[in-house]
Image (cartoon, helix red, strand yellow):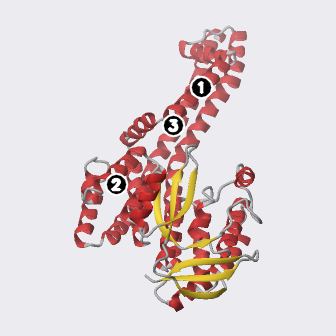
Amino acid sequence: MPAYLATYTSTQGDQRELRLEASDLPAARRNLRRRGILASSLVPAKEGSSPIFTATYASQRGQQKVIQLKAPDLASAKRDLRRRGIAATSVVPMASTRSVQASGGKGGTSLFSRDLGTMFQARPSVREKALFASKLSALVDSGVPIVRGLTLVAKQQKKPIFRQALEAVASEVSQGVSLGVAMRRWPKVFDRITIAMVEAGELGGVLDETLKRLALLLEQNAKLQNQIKGALAYPVIVLLIAIAVFLGMTIFLIPTFAEIFEQLGADLPVFTQMMVNLSALLRSAFSLFLIAFLILAGWLLVGVYNTPLGKRRIDGFILKLPLFGDLIQKTETAQFCRTFSSLSKAGVPILMSLEIVRDTSRNSIFADTIEDCRVEIQDGIPVSVALSRKNVFPEMALSMLAIGEETGEMDAMLSKVADFYEDEVEVAVKALTSLLEPIMIVIVGIIVGAILVAMYLPMFSVFDKIR
């Protein structure tokens, strides 16, 4: 694709140059208008000028870094990074500017002060990001310049960090920085899926269509997450209520009845005596040790789960649980197919798509399977074959994926598989909720009934003495 060099004046009065790719000169002008850039000159770039690539990598402190470098092609850019000792997670060609100010320069905000200011601010939810993508897509599709669109959407945000990020992104885009690169500087707001799809849309000149796909993807992911949260929240809430009722009746109700029976001289049955002893134990210092033990056990469990081996063991155990394991498998399959399909349709390379899908997977067993798939794909093995070797994904999903590869319509087939398993998740959630509801009611009934029986059993002894 031909390259063009645009010269313009930034909002701070600096003379800047922007290199961009477009099919022809009118398309390049439209690209600049979408960014809100008024170029003083726009000429074809010289053949000897090298394109600019954007590389993302993790620093020694684990922070995500972004650098730009010039190279004749992608392979040369990767070799240059290896010579520098940089293990980049992604290297993509980007339209870039000369003399673009870094964060913390004149008119900017330092990275430290920005991170300090946003440390305790609530991140935007998936649904809020989906709404942002939908609004921006409609504005760009209507011909509104991207900078103006970002400014309009920023004013409508309620969360300060989201509004601040969009305003900063709009400012950088107005100075010639690409939208994807500007978003990369706000990892707390924009996830890797959003950034990858935006960058692919910019490169292909179809940013409005890509934003529509992104909005649809985020909305479907939000719906899927809400279904799982709803299915898991119901039994947890009911169980907490049951525990609270049990503790309340054991600690406050049983001692009152125990004093009455003691005054009447009634002989307490074994079961009642056990409940009285338990009540006394919970009202003693033992309860503090019990609470401390539970907190310590929870802390250790979280610590074990944060280790790679512990996470794999626990995630593997969850997948083997009845009802819940099947639900998690269907959810992970639906999210994998939906995200992979959306990234592929947006033009993101398959290896990068699998890397992003791997990082967004919540279950380490699925993440490891996807990572192994990435390695085997580089050796020419089909995706369906690589995924089937771990026996993690459902057989039907793998079969449909294989058909999609054979027919050359993998994106469309992945979308159909995602639709199918999203419906399966919805049905499974309804079935699980309808099954757990009577079980929880029975559990609460048993707890309350046991305490009432323990209190009424001594009544028979009292009646015998009255006679």
Q: For the point 37% across and 46% down, which residue is it?
A: 368
Residue 211 percent coordinates (x, y): 53, 74
Q: Amino acid type of disc 2?
A: Arg
The residue identified by callout 2 is: 374
Badge 3: few (under 14), some or many (20 or more) residues near its Cα, within 10 Å? few
The residue identified by callout 1 is: 296
Of badges 2 and 1, nearer the viewer stands: 2
Vertically, is 52 above or below 85?
Answer: below
315 on left or right of 453: left
From where the camera sits, is residue 253 visible? Answer: yes
Element under label 3? loop
Q: Amino acid type of disc 3?
A: Asn
279 on left or right of 14: left
The residue identified by callout 3 is: 306
295 on left or right of 4: right
Mark 3 to mark 2: distance in Å?
24 Å
Q: For the point 58% across and 19% down, which residue is it?
A: 457
Of badges 3 and 2, nearer the viewer stands: 2
Mark 2 to mark 1: distance in Å?
39 Å
Element under label 2? helix
Q: Amino acid type of disc 1?
A: Leu
Residue 235 disc label: none
Residue 98 percent coordinates (x, y): 62, 72
Name the quadrant containing residue 467: top right
Badge 2: few (under 14), some or many (20 or more) residues near its Cα, within 10 Å? many
Q: State the residue lying farthest toward the bottom.
A: 26
Mark 1 to mark 3: distance in Å?
15 Å
Vertically, is 341 above or below 138?
Answer: above
Name the quadrant containing residue 131: bottom right
Q: For the point 43% across and 81% down, which residue is it?
A: 1
